Image (tube, helix red, strand yellow):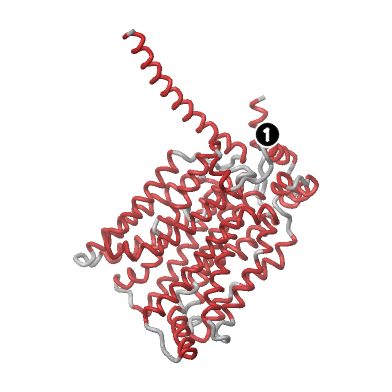
């Protein structure tokens, strides 16, 4: 009987059909790519935006702003995106439960049109507030899409393709950064008169998504487990699986539905109180916080300075930065095309370990480069290595893991927790790093080195491999781990009491 169950589980697989691929590309192009684009879009026109802020205040009040106030307004423009992302991550659970996974992506496009319009017409209206509010609103959209897109793709994908489809959003995030770097060149949209258009380009990909994505079905798991619509579930599976036998997959979803004590979606508080998923919750906390606290944002912040110290002429630094963007895309593609062969754990352990090694290398090179000129190029190589190590695994696998480690009822709350921690950690690094750099100098990268090594060790020793496993099988892996640890603790406790009792008996 056990062999029959294992055989059935092994047969729940599918091929990469055109509908699956098109949905993954559409959702990532119109949502995930915008996150990467918005991360980098304000770097190139920074001086022009500051000048616009100053000239606008002069026309309003008759007095110019001091340099510190202008810098503060620009910093707010940059950081308000992360605040919006945090707000969006808090909304994920409620929206995906009410509107569905695809429905949330489609409905949230209105946020992009509003933000794009505000930023695009900000100069014509002489309103710095429109830029800041637009950045905040597009941050809300990114906070939603960072969680909803991997959730949607993880639920529509057959188990043998869940890793490949789950990393497509992270590849498009890298493409978004690369596109912003390319378009921000002075020869393209890097001129003063073009910056409002540059910021509002987010409307284009979202319009394509809004035009095509509504024609594709909702997540079959959402339709069956939460909406109890068997007919719609069958139609969705037929659409995504094409000629494959969907009976086994239907039975697997129904088994998951029966295993749930309640089909209602749990809240974040209920998730945190549920002892049956404590290892899953701890795991997403570690990998999502580790993803941001690994220092990748600090590296992006410090890239231009490192390149300048390496002797690269200032006019050429923008082209060198574009080169790092290309490396991001290549590394993301390498992770996407190898994840189903290598698995999740090797990409995570290898990526974080390599990042830790390169962080230590940057510390060493920055200390020695004043005495050993060759070390300048080592620091450039370490920057490239950190970016490549991040994009090949840690950039996307944590979002995929959040989908895989939880059943249907717990998944929205898990994404809310993961997304909020991701954005809080992102904001923390951006805020703390300048002070850490001033106090610790080159040694600040050893902090990131320690975090990377610690996360790699946690993944290696705690998180099981989820490649080619159903959601039920993954839950059982964690249940057996929790049961083994609980039994060990209980046995230790009993032995302790038993020893005490025996000693007491002897004395008596």
Residue placed at 43% from the left, 58% from the top?
Answer: 388
Give the residue at the far right of this rendering.
231
Using the image as rendered, state which of residue 148 and residue 14 is in the foreground: 148
Going by the image, does 213 lie left or right of 334?
A: right
> In the visual, does 428 lie left or right of 20?
left
**The image quarter in which residue 34 lies:** bottom right
Residue 146 lies in quadrant: bottom right
Q: Is residue 157 left or right of residue 52?
A: right
Q: Secondary structure at mark 1?
A: helix
Residue placed most toward the observer, 136 or 204? 136
| Residue 37 drawn at (x, y percent) | 53, 69
Q: Identify the residue at the far left of this view.
A: 371
- Whether 499 is drawn above or below 87: the answer is above
Which residue is depicted at the point 33% across and 71% down? 305
Image quarter (top left, top right, bottom left or bottom right) of the N terminus: top right
Q: Residues within 10 Å of mark 1 (few under 14, many from 20)?
A: some
| Quarter of the figure that contains the C terminus | top left
In the displayed structure, 166 sits above or below 79; it is: above
Question: Percent position (x, y) of residue 47?
Answer: 43, 81
- How many numbered marks, from 0 up? 1
Going by the image, does 131 lie left or right of 459? right
> What residue lies at 66% left-to-right and 51% top-to-bottom?
16
Pointer 1 residue: 8
x, y percent for residue 299: 38, 63
Residue 73, image x and y in percent? 44, 76
């Amino acid at each position: 009987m056990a062999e029959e169950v294992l055989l059935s589980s092994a047969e729940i697989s599918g091929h990469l059909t055109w509908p699956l691929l098109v949905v993954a590309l559409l959702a990532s192009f119109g949502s995930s790519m915008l996150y990467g684009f918005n991360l980098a879009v304000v770097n190139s026109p920074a001086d022009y935006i500051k000048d616009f802020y100053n000239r606008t205040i002069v026309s309003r009040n008759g007095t110019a702003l001091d340099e510190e106030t202008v810098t503060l307004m620009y910093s707010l423009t940059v950081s308000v995106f992360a605040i919006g992302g945090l707000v969006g991550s808090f909304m994920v659970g409620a929206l995906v439960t009410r509107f569905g996974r695809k429905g949330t992506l489609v409905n949230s496009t209105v946020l992009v049109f509003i933000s794009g319009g505000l930023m695009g017409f900000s100069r014509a209206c002489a309103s710095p507030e429109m830029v800041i509010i637009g950045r905040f609103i597009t941050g809300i959209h990114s906070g939603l899409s960072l969680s909803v897109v991997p959730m949607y793709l993880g639920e529509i994908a057959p188990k043998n393709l869940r890793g490949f489809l789950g990393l497509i959003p992270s590849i498009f995030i890298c493409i978004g950064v690369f596109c912003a770097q390319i378009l921000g060149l002075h020869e393209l949209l890097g001129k003063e008169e073009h910056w409002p258009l540059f910021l509002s380009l987010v409307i284009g990909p979202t319009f394509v998504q809004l035009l095509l994505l509504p024609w594709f079905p909702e997540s079959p798991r959402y339709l069956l487990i939460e909406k109890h619509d068997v007919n719609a579930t069958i139609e969705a599976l037929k659409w995504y699986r094409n000629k494959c036998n969907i009976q086994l997959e239907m039975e697997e979803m129904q088994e998951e539905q029966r295993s749930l004590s309640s089909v209602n979606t749990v809240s974040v508080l209920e998730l945190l109180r549920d002892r049956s998923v404590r290892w899953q919750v701890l795991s997403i906390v570690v990998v999502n916080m580790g993803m941001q606290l690994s220092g990748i944002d600090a590296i992006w912040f410090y890239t231009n300075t490192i390149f300048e110290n390496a002797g690269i002429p200032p006019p050429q630094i923008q082209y060198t930065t574009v080169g790092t963007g290309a490396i991001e895309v290549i590394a993301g593609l390498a992770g996407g095309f190898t994840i189903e062969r290598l698995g999740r754990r090797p990409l995570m352990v290898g990526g974080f370990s390599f990042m830790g090694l390169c962080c230590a290398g940057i510390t060493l090179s920055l200390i020695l480069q004043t005495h050993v000129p060759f070390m300048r190029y080592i620091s450039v190589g370490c920057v490239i290595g950190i970016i490549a190590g991040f994009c090949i695994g840690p950039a996307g696998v944590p979002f995929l893991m959040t989908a895989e480690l939880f059943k249907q009822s717990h998944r929205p709350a898990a994404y809310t927790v993961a997304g909020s921690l991701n954005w809080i950690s992102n904001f923390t690094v951006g805020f703390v790093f300048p002070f850490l750099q001033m106090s610790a100098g080159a040694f600040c990268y050893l902090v990131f080195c320690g975090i990377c090594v610690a996360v790699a060790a946690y993944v290696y020793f705690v998180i099981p491999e989820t490649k080619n496993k159903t959601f039920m099988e993954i839950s059982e892996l964690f249940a057996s781990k929790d049961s083994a640890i609980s039994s060990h603790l209980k046995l230790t406790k009993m032995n302790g009491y038993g020893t005490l009792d025996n000693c007491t008996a002897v004395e008596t």
